[in-house]
Image (cartoon, rainbow, N blue to C red):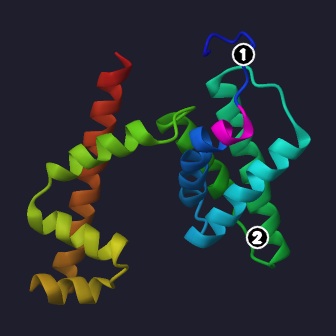
Amino acid sequence: MSDGIQNTDPLSPEQLIHKYQHGIWRYLRVLGCEASLAEDITQETFLRVIKKGFEQYNDAATAGYLRKVAYNLFISVQRREGRNLVTDEIERLDASWDKWAGADNGDALLDMLRECLNGLTERARNALELRFREERTRSAIADQLQITEHGAKNLMQRAKKQLRNCVEHKSQAEMN
């Protein structure tokens, strides 16, 4: 149910994990959490929530509660490891997740992003894939695409701006 009324048929722990784990992992990655740590924190989030128990009201409330538990675990891990956090930045990222994905696991946003990626030139897609999937340096990207390093920087900036505008446009269209 998503009307604010308490769900009379709560999800089992297995259903809860199945429904929300991808969204929690994506959310942690948005906050800057490394992939394997995001997996660990996602598991710990569900362990804590299931062990403690909570009332399931609706999808948005459940997703929000799980994100809050994951957020607090992430902050705790960072502090325990002595990492200085810019909590304003993490709070900004958290607010961005709420704006873009809300109670969704990020699936709709990911679909929009995939559509928008298809609208980029092949060269721009390649540059972004090299940077974000393969974690290549700007210099390596420039070499591979046979352009200058400055050209690679500009190409990626334009591509990211085009993606942002495209996703914003699609998101606005969905809301209307």
The mark closer to the camera, 1 or 2, is 1
Check disc 1 and report its element: helix, strand or loop.
loop
**Residue 87 visible in image:** no
| Residue at (90% x, 42% y) in the render | 52
- Binning the other alpha carbons within 10 Å of mark 2 as few (below 14), some (14 to 19) or many (20 upward) gives some
Can residue 39 be seen in the rendering of this structure?
Answer: yes
Q: Position of residue 11 (x, y in %)?
A: 70, 29
Q: Nearer the viewer, residue 2 or 99?
A: 2
What percent of the width, then of the height, locates residue 16? Answer: 67, 38
Query: What is the total number of numbered labels drawn onto the structure image?
Result: 2
Dot 2 falls on a residue whose secondary structure is: helix
Residue under label 1, please give it.
7
Please tell me whether residue 172 is drawn above or below residue 15 in the rendered image: above
Q: Locate the N terminus by quadrant.
A: top right
As rendered, which of 157 and 129 lies closer to the eye? 129
Q: Earlier in the sequence, mark 1 or mark 2?
A: 1
Amino acid identity at mark 2: Gln
Q: Residue at position x 71%, y 57% from top?
A: 43
Name the quadrant containing residue 129. Answer: bottom left
Which quadrant would residue 67 be assigned to in this image? top right
Q: Which residues are magenta?
A: 12-16
> In the rendered image, which residue does mark 2 sit on?
78
Q: Residue furthest right?
A: 52
| Residue 38 forms part of the magenta stretch | no
- Relative placement, left or right, of 116 versus 92 is left
Q: Quadrant of the C terminus?
A: top left
Q: Is residue 56 above or below residue 34?
A: above
Q: Is residue 13 magenta?
A: yes
Q: Position of residue 86 (x, y in %)?
A: 69, 64
Give left or right: position of 116 versus 108: left
